[in-house]
Image: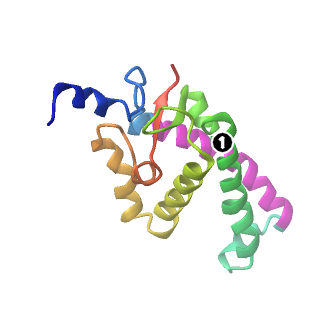
Amino acid sequence: MESSSSGSAEAQPHAPAASEYVGFWKRLVAALIDVMILLVIIVPVEFAIFGTDYVDRAMAGETMAVDFWVQFALPLVAVLLFWRYRKGTPGLIAIDARIADAKTGAPATTGKLLLRALVLALLLILSPFIVGLIGLVWMVFDKRKQGLHDKAAGTVVVYND
């Protein structure tokens, strides 16, 4: 029943052949750009709220509620908004890349982006040294350069055409 036409039909569900997948090292550069931008925003906010003894207060566990919002929740919302409306974070934009639906190559839906963010957060925060590392390094070996968060959400990161 399989014919040569089934092979070409199978190529359709993926991002267009003209799109080149962005690999681990370029995505790491994009992530580092994003982290630097976040640090430029988060550090002054934390010091504005807690003063110059922020580090001591954080080590004593006095800043956890604010830290959750300033270092996790609000950046997560910002990332989702960038993904949704700009198709990538500032780091991805800087390397001329975007997040796309893995099957169609079209912009990913809000639902897929939300799932991608939640899986990425779980990989990075709950188990950063084991599951997170495996989940992110997975893209080195994957033919479409997908991390586990991309696979779970059905997304790919491709260069802009």
Residue 143 falls in image quadrant: top left
Disc tally is 1
The quarter in which the N terminus is drawn is top left
Return the x and y of residue 93 as percentages of the image width and height. 60, 30
Return the x and y of residue 28 as percentages of the image width and height. 47, 41
Above or below — where is 21 with respect to 133?
above
Q: Where does the magenta region start and end?
A: 27-49
In the rendered image, residue 141 lying in the magenta stretch gets the answer no
Q: Nearer the viewer, residue 81 or 129?
A: 81
In the rendered image, residue 46 lying in the magenta stretch gets the answer yes
Above or below — where is 83 with respect to 69?
above
Q: Quick check: 144 left or right of 52?
A: left
Q: Nearer the viewer, residue 76 or 49?
A: 76
Above or below — where is 155 with respect to 75?
above
Majority secondary structure in the magenta region: helix
SS under mark 1 = helix
What residue is drawn where x is 74% and y is 74%?
Answer: 65
Q: Nearer the viewer, residue 101 or 75?
A: 101
Q: What type is the residue that disc 1 sits on?
A: Arg
What residue is drawn where x is 69% and y is 37%?
Answer: 85
Return the x and y of residue 55 as percentages of the image width and height. 70, 68
Q: Quick check: 68 left or right of 116?
A: right
What residue is drawn where x is 34% and y is 37%?
Answer: 144
What residue is drawn where x is 48% and y is 32%?
Answer: 105
What crowding class fits label 1: few (fewer than 14 Cα within 10 Å), some (14-19), or many (20 or more)? many
Q: How is the image coloured?
A: rainbow
Return the x and y of residue 80 as percentages of the image width and height. 65, 49
- Location of mark 1 (residue): 84
Q: Point out the residue furthest to the front here.
A: 1
Q: Nearer the viewer, residue 139 or 35?
A: 139
